[in-house]
Image (tube, rainbow, N blue to C red):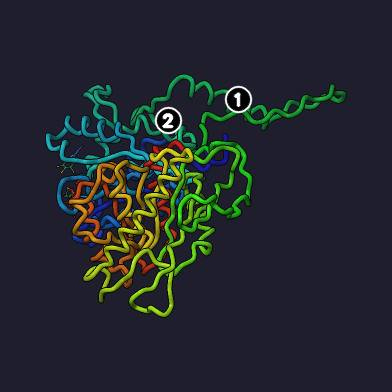
Amino acid sequence: MSDRDEEGILIGLVSVSDRASSGVYEDKGIPALREWCTAAIETPVRFAERLIPDDRYTIEKTLTELVDDEKCDLVLTTGGTGPSRRDVTPEATLAVATRELPGFGEQMRAISLKFVPTAILSRQVGALREIPDHAALIINLPGQPKAIAETLGGLRDEDGKVIVPGIFAAVPYCIDLIGGPWVDTRPEVCKAFRPKSALKAREEALKAAAEKAVPDVPEKTEAPQPPEKAPEAETRQTPPFVDPAPVRIPGNRNAVPEPPASDLETIVIEPSDTRLPPPCTVVWLGGMGVDIHDFSDLPSEIEQLGGPAARYVMVNAPEMQLSMDPANPLRAWYDLPGRNLIDYEDEEGIRMSARRISRLIDSITARGMPRQRIFLAGFSQGGSMALFTGLREELSIAGIISLSGYLPLAGRIADEIRPGGLATPVFMGNGDFDEIVPIPVAQQSLQAISHAGAAVSWRDYPTEHTLSGEALRDTALFMRRVLGGKH
Ligand SMILES: Nc1ncnc2c1ncn2[C@@H]1O[C@H](COP(=O)(O)OP(=O)(O)OP(=O)(O)O)[C@@H](O)[C@H]1O
Ligand SMILES: Nc1nc2c(c(=O)[nH]1)N[C@H]1C(S)=C(S)[C@@H](COP(=O)(O)O)O[C@H]1N2
């Protein structure tokens, strides 16, 4: 038995209810979750509990904290899965998830339909959140306190025979597979199912551990012992995010000059392990007035936060004269001639920069990286150019990422979006207190992009105009999600 097995499973219990969290009524969600789990789980179990309102940002933050900081193995939410406007638990769950497990939602609706016809109104999901050193299963349950036992435990007839198995029957094996502790259940409450091979491997692991713990009484004269056997592989499988190669070469992050490929100034930062070709390339566009050399730590930060081991082509904006201070040329993708970002826009400058960036993507493709594995990303004006350029590409790329950016010439996108833009997933992350790209401007961009038909996901953070750790973490997860969790 490993230390993790001895500590037992850590379960996050989250009750999402406007009224219970504001004291209008007493919360029955967490007590019902705790009671059911305590009755059902035989192995050690610990809980981390949160009562929060139906607010998407709070739900996402709570889920990431429970998984990333508290290291919960399983998070059960209750409430906020229905069709009311305030019901956003599934959206928040998917926003922080790396992969969905659709079977959980399907089975819960099937079970609930045996109890109430309104079961189909619940949009509940099951999903994994995987970070480099940990993973958790997150499951949404409906808000009705009685629905908790119904969906987790299923339906039995009068003799106690299971008619429809509850979803918890599949949870212990799922926890095994994502690297969590071994969980045994009490069959009278919920009979967990594991394939025979998993049970056998567990039995052998326990036997080996017991033999190691109680060694045979040593003989006085002993033949030389064979070298001690490495502990049996436990039934718990590989941890999440297996890197393409088993050993990493640290510190191999020297910026090397990009061979001339376009007229833009670039530096290339290779992933820390250079033995395998990188699975994708991120074209990272610098912002206004910054030198991309100052951001050379960014790729490793994103990789450490769970991003793929990508090659980064960091691109400096060209130097230009700006209306605001013509005497001092500055790095910028376009001029800002108006009183604010959008009342008067430098259309010519924006379009010229987009052409240069598009040519750079072509040159990367020409050197062997498929477009489906190229991300176009950037911060501030760089993010804005990523949106403007990526949405106008004829052929799709892996994804577009704009942090603290907005869409220039937003009114034109519906007419100018190209098939590639329509097929490319977009992520926008903006600060609520950003004074340079105010949140209403970013939200108008979001609306314009989504009305134009592109698939855009959005997050806002309680920050100013800055590259926050949370935004980088979401960037890492977006890339993983888009690549399909393969890297
Ligand atoms: N945490 C809770 N504690 C007690 N009862 C709850 C809780 N959550 C929901 N309920 C009950 O289940 C019903 C349906 O749940 P639902 O999640 O749709 O709540 P709601 O109408 O969105 O309101 P709220 O989010 O304020 O709980 C509620 O009207 C309430 O009677
Ligand atoms: N087992 C079970 N599932 C259920 C219910 C229930 O009472 N029991 N209520 C349904 C109803 S009425 C709604 S609106 C949805 C969404 O509930 P939520 O918004 O409280 O999450 O869950 C459905 N699923």
Looking at numbered disc 1 in the image, what kind of residue is underneath it? Lys
Name the foreground residue: 346 vs 481.
346
How many C-alpha atoms fall within 10 Å of the one at disc 2: few (<14), some, or many (≥20)? many
Q: Is residue 92 above or below residue 182?
A: below
Q: Indicate which disc residue 134 carries.
A: none
Tell me which numbered mark, 1 or 2, is placed earlier along the sequence: 2
- Give left or right: position of 117 versus 342: left
**Where does the image place residue 62, in percent across and percent down from the top left?**
36, 55
* Outermost top residue: 196
Q: Position of residue 247 (x, y in %)?
A: 62, 39
Q: Are marks 1 and 2 in contact (CB under 8 Å)?
A: no
Q: State which quadrant residue 285 falls in.
A: bottom left
Q: CA distance from mark 1 to mark 2?
A: 20 Å
- Regarding mark 1 in the picture, which secondary structure is present there? helix
Towards the viewer: 304 or 417: 417
The quadrant of the image that shows the N terminus is: top right
Pair 1/2: label in front = 2
Query: In percent of the image, x 46 and y 52: which residue is there?
Result: 262
Residue at image mark 2: 173
456 versus 433 height, above or below:
above
Q: Quadrant of residue 462?
A: bottom left
Q: Is residue 278 above or below residue 289?
A: above
Rendering quarter of residue 217: top right
Please report the residue visible at 62 percent of the width from the left and 50 percent of the height from the top. Answer: 252
For the point 28% across and 49% down, the residue is 392
Which amino acid type is shown beneath numbered disc 2? Answer: Tyr
Count the marks: 2
Position of 61 relative to 100 (above/below):
below
Residue located at (33% from left, 38% from top): 100
Is residue 51 visible to the viewer in this orientation of the structure?
no
The residue to which callout 1 is attached is 207
